[in-house]
Amino acid sequence: MGFVGLVWANLLRNPLRSLLTAGAVALAVLLVCILLTMPAGLDALISRIASNTRISVVNEAGLVYTMPYAYARKIRALPGVEDAMAQMWFGGAFEEEGRVTFPNFAVEADRVETVFPDWNIAPEGMADFRRYRDGAIVGRETMKKYGWKIGDRITLRSTIWPVALDLRIVAEIPSDRAPVLWLNRDYLEQTLEAMGRKLGIAGIIWVKVRDPKDVNSVMLRIEELTKNSDAETSTQTEKSFFSSFFGSLEGFVTILMTVTVLVSLCIVFIAGNTASMAVRERAGEIAVLKAIGFPRRVIFSMLVAETLLLASLAGAAGVGLAYALTTALREVAAGSAQLGPLGGFIVTRGVVIEGLVLSLAIGALAGFVPAFGAARRPVAETLREIF
């Protein structure tokens, strides 16, 4: 029997123990591979919903602070800017008093089409949004949630402004992941003026840049425009803007990765204990092998090879399970708005390599100590303990 055959035969000596140890390693590798796909998955999700020519402008103090509405007009006049749209949080509650169940904003109706052309809102819907003061554009997700359709009338009671606006749904945002509602800023402004109040502010100004190469220069011009004013601004690309909202998720992923490292260490100890038990059970055989002339390095290599082979097979199984799981999630996500973001979680070649390296590391660490001790132990001492 050759070296590989001997290693394989020793692994099959106790199939149940080997299977349970391999299962523990496979689950650890599966967990690590799934978590390693999360950063790339989040980045893919943000890239799908963000434009590389759109910039967000907010008050430097934070999103909860406003800016003068006049900033939008000044920004439109800057070189490289195609258009700019002021957006203001309306905070309208539909069903429950004081509870906002979907994001809703007052926007400039005649700017939506040029600033958000990639949202693919129907041209006739956009024309009605500009025509009707009480028009509203609603995301498909919210339309489905409440059973609304184009032409329906709804009433939103603002939690920010002392108004309740009656709205007519004139268009839909054709995306299953769009929960937002847009209403006409002029409608809100005129309603407030009738009450003796003025709007005159903006929460976010979305800027459409003509050329992606001009994005950085336009951002610098905007910040220079508002420098040393009472409301200095901070600019970000749309991708960076959405990434900031996923910052807490990135921290959560870091915590999960830390826990996974600890779980992997536990698996190392479990596999090491299993290897030690296997070595103790075969102490007599190992002593006989030494007695008939097997060198220590051969015995050491054989014992380490057993744990490496077991761990590598388990690692391959774990990587395969991770690939199958993410593939299944992508297929399910293709037909589900709620699970749509999971389609970006892909087991790449780098993730496969990292999973296999982890399994080999577990095998090497678990097998080294018991193999080293068994290889160094004198033959006479071992035989005395057995007989």
Image (spheres, grey):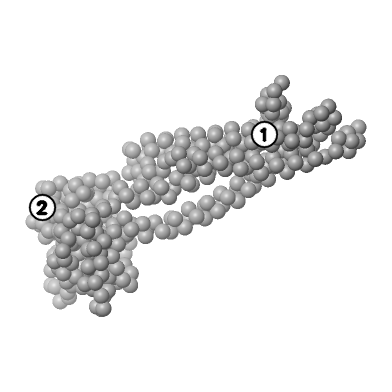
Q: Of the residues shown, which amino acid type is indicated by label 1? A: Ala
Sequence-wise, the earlier of marks 2 and 1 is 2
The answer to whether one can see residue 215 in this image is yes
Q: Position of residue 211 (x, y in %)?
A: 20, 55
Query: What residue is disc 2 on?
Result: 128
* CB within 8 Å, label 2 to label 1: no
Give the residue type at disc 2: Asp
- Kind of element beneath mark 2: helix
Residue at point 66%, 36% (across, down): 307
Would residue 195 appear left or right of 158 to someone viewing this image? left
Question: What mark, if any, has residue 243 been given in the picture?
Answer: none
Find the residue positioned furthest to the left. 131
Which image quarter holds the C terminus?
top right
Q: Quadrant of residue 189?
A: bottom left
Residue ID at (10%, 52%): 127
The number of callouts visible is 2
- Crowd tier of the residue under label 2, counting other residues whose Cα lies within 10 Å: few below 14, some 14–19, many 20 or above: some
- Residue 276 versus residue 141: which sits nearer the camera? 276
Question: Which residue is painted at 45% across and 45% down in the image?
Answer: 37
Residue 44, image x and y in percent? 35, 47
Is residue 256 left or right of 268 when viewed as pictured?
Answer: left
Q: Which element is circle 1 on?
A: helix
**Mark 1 crowdedness (10 Å alpha carbons): few <14, some 14-19, many ≥20:** many
Q: CA distance from mark 2 to mark 1?
A: 72 Å
Give percent across and percent down for residue 96: 31, 59
Is there any visible trace of residue 145 in the rendered image?
no
> Which residue position holds label 1?
305
Q: Residue at x 70, y 35 (%)?
A: 301
